[in-house]
Image (spheres, grey):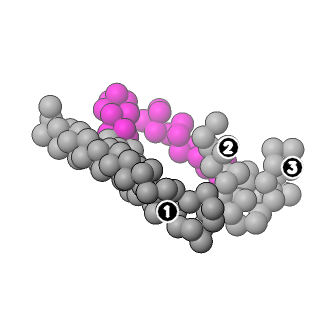
Amino acid sequence: MVPLSTSYAIADATGSPRSVSSSFRQAPLFYGLFTLQIVVGAGVALAPGNLVALVVNAQVLNGIITPMLLTYILILANRKSVLGPAVNGRIFKVVATLCVAVVGVMSLIVLVLTVKGF
């Protein structure tokens, strides 16, 4: 599901044709990205090594990226030029900022514990 939605989003962002009902000739970027992601995923799954460690490390990476993405979303949600009258209020700004900070600190703790081998 993730490769399909990623391919759709990238093709949409570039203005390329995107549809599972299209042929490869009609939507080459969409199907090319989808195929590449499936092949890379299969290659990783079939590669020798500890897949549990791979999943744990992927989650640590996700924990590092999440606070950055949340900060970006929070900045956008606080801009009146982006959301107009639906912009965040003062109380929500404080609560959301606190939540992002807590997620960031927890991510840092998990990163340190993973690097130290706990």
Q: Is residue 115 magenta?
A: no
Residue 72 picture location, percent across and down: 45, 60
Residue denoted by label 3: 22
Q: Residue 83: horizontal and vertical position, in percent?
A: 61, 62
Which residue is tagged 2?
Answer: 4
User: In the image, is residue 45 above or below residue 105?
Assistant: above
User: Magenta-highlighted stretch: main secondary structure?
Assistant: helix
Q: Are marks 1 and 3 in contact (CB under 8 Å)?
A: no
Labels 1 and 2 touching (C-beta < 8 A): no
Residue at point 77% right, 58% down? Answer: 28
Secondary structure under tag 1 reads: loop
Element assignment for label 3: loop
Picture residue at 32% right of the left edge, 44% below the top: 103
Image side of residue 85 versus residue 109, left or right: right
Label 2 neighbour load within 10 Å: few <14, some 14-19, many 20+: some
Q: Which mark is residue 78?
A: 1
Look at the image and give the residue range highlighted in magenta.
32-59
Other residues around mark 3 within 10 Å, as few (<14) / some (14–19) / many (≥20)? few
Marks 1 and 3: which is nearer the front? 1
- Mark 1–mark 3 distance (CA, rounded to whole Å): 39 Å
- Magenta span includes 38: yes
Q: Which mark sits nearer the N-terminus, 1 or 2? A: 2
Q: Using the image, tell me which numbered label, if any, was put on residue 57.
A: none
What residue is at 67 percent from the left and 43 percent from the top? 4
The kind of secondary structure element at disc 2 is: helix
**Quarter occupied by the N terminus:** top right
Instruction: Residue type at mark 3: give it.
Output: Ser
